[in-house]
Image (cartoon, rainbow, N blue to C red):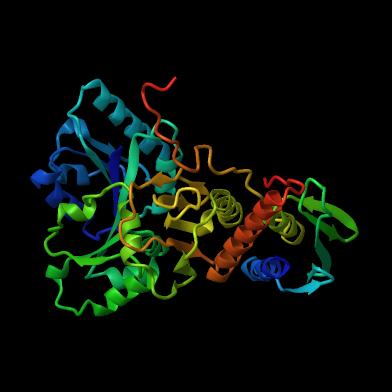
């Protein structure tokens, strides 16, 4: 997972036209870009989030890979405006067809 | 669901000639037509044979920017009058855009309106490029390149007006959009089935099944590529993937169309459509259109790499899988939002 997330972050920096360095370090990820250091680690078990980010001494948490990406981009690209959109207001899988006799 | 096809192409590409030809075909007799003309004095609607009740002209602006709202209002009005029986019961709708229109916001407008949801479905985006001026137009006009990039079906028109070899134009068009079929048209004679294929709903997904781009296509910064997955994608992973795309790509995601094998329902492909940051609720086909049951998503993007999208899907799938196995193990639950 860490390797996969590191690869995503590396591709993300390129996509955001930022130059930086992403490395796996101590079972986490170390990211350096534009003079900003970000470390990303798995959250301890039992916490209601999955990722802990340390950004210039400040702790942030994220519940998913998407959350990590959003925090990193907000930090490194201040002009980025996250979109508060949630997908799938409709059922993501078709509802089972119910008999008309069903209550 | 009433299928809606969009006929687009740069100024002078021959859209109206093609539409006029199509509207004379009995196969399209029950078709409502919306024409967007740029400028105060419209002419195109005079060139189309259609009943007055089902022909709507939108003037004084370009459909993609100034009067997108008018399009939605017109569509809702047409549907309401059809339901009330005050106009002939049309079975399909064609929207001819102005030559300067960027199709992406138009698609977006169709997808986000609550009143239209559940009543209309995008059938095809058909883009016309003319053999006489097409090469120069594609070189000079970014709108023309976008029109080609988002098309489900590409038409090279006016081949009857030039003796020039169209192969360079074909290559330029294919470089922008290698996944969509390309058809030649002379004298505006286009088969109605091109505009409205038999399996209209999700028909552009059927194109995906047959014509995945075999390679990256780059023209300026527009790229077309396909992401293919052998194994089914969990529904929650698909939702998260689309959310992150919408969040990070915005207007640079010109179009996404795909057939997805969802793990919870693998026997029915989900057809997904996205334009910029708007994603349509998945449509479910009854069966897979071919023996190929892999997830196939075609991206038409500006400045977004295939590497990033592939890495994103990998990471989200892995995270969802990890979470699922954690739950199976009876360990602490995390919710992904």
Up the image or down, B79 lies above or below B272; here it is above
Q: Residue furthest front?
A: B329
| Total numbered labels | 0
Up the image or down, A34 lies above or below A99; here it is below
Question: Relative to B175, is B47 on the left or the right?
Answer: left
Question: Relative to B292, is B249 on the left or the right?
Answer: right
Question: Relative to A96, is B132 on the left or the right?
Answer: left
Q: Position of residue B185 (x, y in %)?
A: 16, 64
Q: Which image quarter: residue B177? A: bottom left
Q: Residue furthest right?
A: A57
The residue closer to the viewer here, B289 or B115, is B289
Q: Determine the residue positioned at 22% across, 76% down.
A: B166
Tell me if I can see residue B36 in this picture: no
Q: Position of residue B5 (x, y in %)?
A: 28, 48
Up the image or down, B64 lies above or below A90; here it is below
Q: Position of residue B270 (x, y in %)?
A: 42, 50
The residue closer to the viewer here, B183 or B328, is B328
Q: Determine the residue positioned at 14% across, 77% down.
A: B163
Q: Determine the residue positioned at 8% across, 44% down.
A: B26
Quadrant of the drawing holding the C terminus of chain B: top right
Question: Relative to B300, is B84 on the left or the right?
Answer: left
Q: Determine the residue positioned at 37% across, 44% down.
A: B61
The residue closer to the viewer here, B295 or A61, is B295
Quadrant of the drawing holding the N terminus of chain B: top left
Q: Position of residue A68 (x, y in %)?
A: 72, 56
Tell me if I can see residue B239 in this picture: yes
């Amino acid at each position: 997972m860490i390797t996969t997330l590191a690869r995503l972050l590396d591709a993300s920096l390129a996509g955001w036209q930022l130059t930086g360095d992403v490395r796996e370090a101590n079972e986490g990820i170390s990211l350096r870009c534009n003079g900003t250091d970000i470390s990303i680690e798995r959250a301890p078990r039992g916490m209601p989030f999955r990722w802990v980010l340390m950004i210039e001494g400040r702790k942030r948490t994220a519940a998913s890979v998407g959350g990590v990406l959003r925090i990193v981009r907000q930090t490194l690209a201040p002009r980025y405006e996250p979109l508060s959109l949630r997908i799938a207001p409709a059922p993501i899988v078709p509802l089972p067809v119910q008999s008309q006799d069903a209550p | 669901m009433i299928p809606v096809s969009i006929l687009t192409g740069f100024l002078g590409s021959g859209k109206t000639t093609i539409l006029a030809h199509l509207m004379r075909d009995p196969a399209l007799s029950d078709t409502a037509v919306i024409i967007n003309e740029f400028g105060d004095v419209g002419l195109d609607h005079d060139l189309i044979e259609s009943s007055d009740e089902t022909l709507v002209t939108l003037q004084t602006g370009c459909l993609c920017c100034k009067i997108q709202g008018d399009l939605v209002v017109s569509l809702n009005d047409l549907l309401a009058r059809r339901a009330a029986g005050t106009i002939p019961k049309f079975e399909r709708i064609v929207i001819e855009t102005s030559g300067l229109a960027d199709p992406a916001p138009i698609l977006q407008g169709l997808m986000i309106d609550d009143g239209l949801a559940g009543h209309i479905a995008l059938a095809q985006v058909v883009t016309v490029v003319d053999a006489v001026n097409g090469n120069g137009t594609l070189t000079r006009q970014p709108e023309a390149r976008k029109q080609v990039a988002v098309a489900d079906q590409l038409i090279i028109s006016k081949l009857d007006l030039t003796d020039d070899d169209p192969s360079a134009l074909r290559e330029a068009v294919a470089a922008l959009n290698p996944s969509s079929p390309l058809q030649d048209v002379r004298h505006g004679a286009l088969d109605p089935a091109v505009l409205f294929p038999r399996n209209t709903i999700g028909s552009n997904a059927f194109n995906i099944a047959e014509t995945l781009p075999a390679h990256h296509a780059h023209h300026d910064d527009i790229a077309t590529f396909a992401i293919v997955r052998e194994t089914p994608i969990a529904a929650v992973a698909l939702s998260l993937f689309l959310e992150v795309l919408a969040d990070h790509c915005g207007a640079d995601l010109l179009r996404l169309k795909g057939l997805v094998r969802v793990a919870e329902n693998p026997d029915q492909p989900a057809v997904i459509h996205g334009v910029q940051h708007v994603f349509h609720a998945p449509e479910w086909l009854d069966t897979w259109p071919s023996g190929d049951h892999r997830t196939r998503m075609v991206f038409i993007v500006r400045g977004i790499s295939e590497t990033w999208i592939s890495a994103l899907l990998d990471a989200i799938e892995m995270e969802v899988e990890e979470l699922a196995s954690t739950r199976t193990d009876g360990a602490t639950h995390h919710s992904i939002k």
